[in-house]
Image: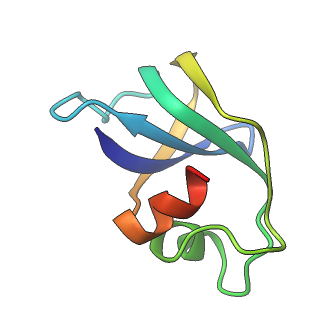
Amino acid sequence: MKNYLITTKHRGVWFAQIEEGKDITSETLTDLYNCRMAIKWGTEDGLQQLCNTGPTERTKMSSVSDIAVLHHVTAVFNVTDKAALKWLK
C-alpha cells in the first residue's frame, strides 16, 4: 500500500492508502483504505505539512474508514512514511 493525501473539489482533505500500481490520475478514485479526513488542519506550514510530517496535536481528524469511491479529486500528494504513522494512530 502507498500513502497519499487527496483533496477534492468540495474542499475535502483525506489521508488514504491505495494499492501499489493503481491508477491515481482519475478524478474518481476507488478502493481507498484506512482513510481519515482532516477536519481541521492545525498546521503552521499549510497542507503539505500534513504530507511531510503528518498531523499535529492541533489537527482534528475523523475516525478511520475505507472509502469505496471518492469523486471530484483535485490533487493527490505523496505522504512520507513518518507522516503516515501519525495518520494511522
Residue with the most extreme top position: 68
Which scheme is used to colour this image of the protein? rainbow
Measured as percent of width and height from the top left, residue 17 is found at 41, 38
Residue at the image point whose x is 58% and y is 55% from the top: 87
Residue at the image point whose x is 57% and y is 62% from the top: 86
Residue with the most extreme front position: 89
Say left or right for 23 vs 77. left
Name the quadrant containing residue 8: top right
Measured as percent of width and height from the top left, residue 74 is found at 52, 43
Measured as percent of width and height from the top left, residue 70 is found at 56, 23
Residue with the most extreme left position: 21
Front one among 49 and 85: 85
Residue at the image point whose x is 36% and y is 28% from the top: 26
Q: Is residue 30 above or below residue 20?
A: above
Q: Is residue 22 above or below residue 47?
A: above
Q: Is residue 7 above or below residue 55?
A: above
What is the quadrant of the N terminus in the image? top left
Front one among 49 and 57: 57
Using the rendered image of the protein, determine whether residue 80 is visible from the camera's viewpoint. Answer: no
Say left or right for 70 vs 10. left
Front one among 7 and 52: 52
Q: How many marks?
A: 0
Using the rendered image of the protein, determine whether residue 36 is visible from the camera's viewpoint. Answer: yes
Q: Is residue 20 above or below residue 13?
A: above
Residue at the image point whose x is 73% and y is 87% from the top: 44
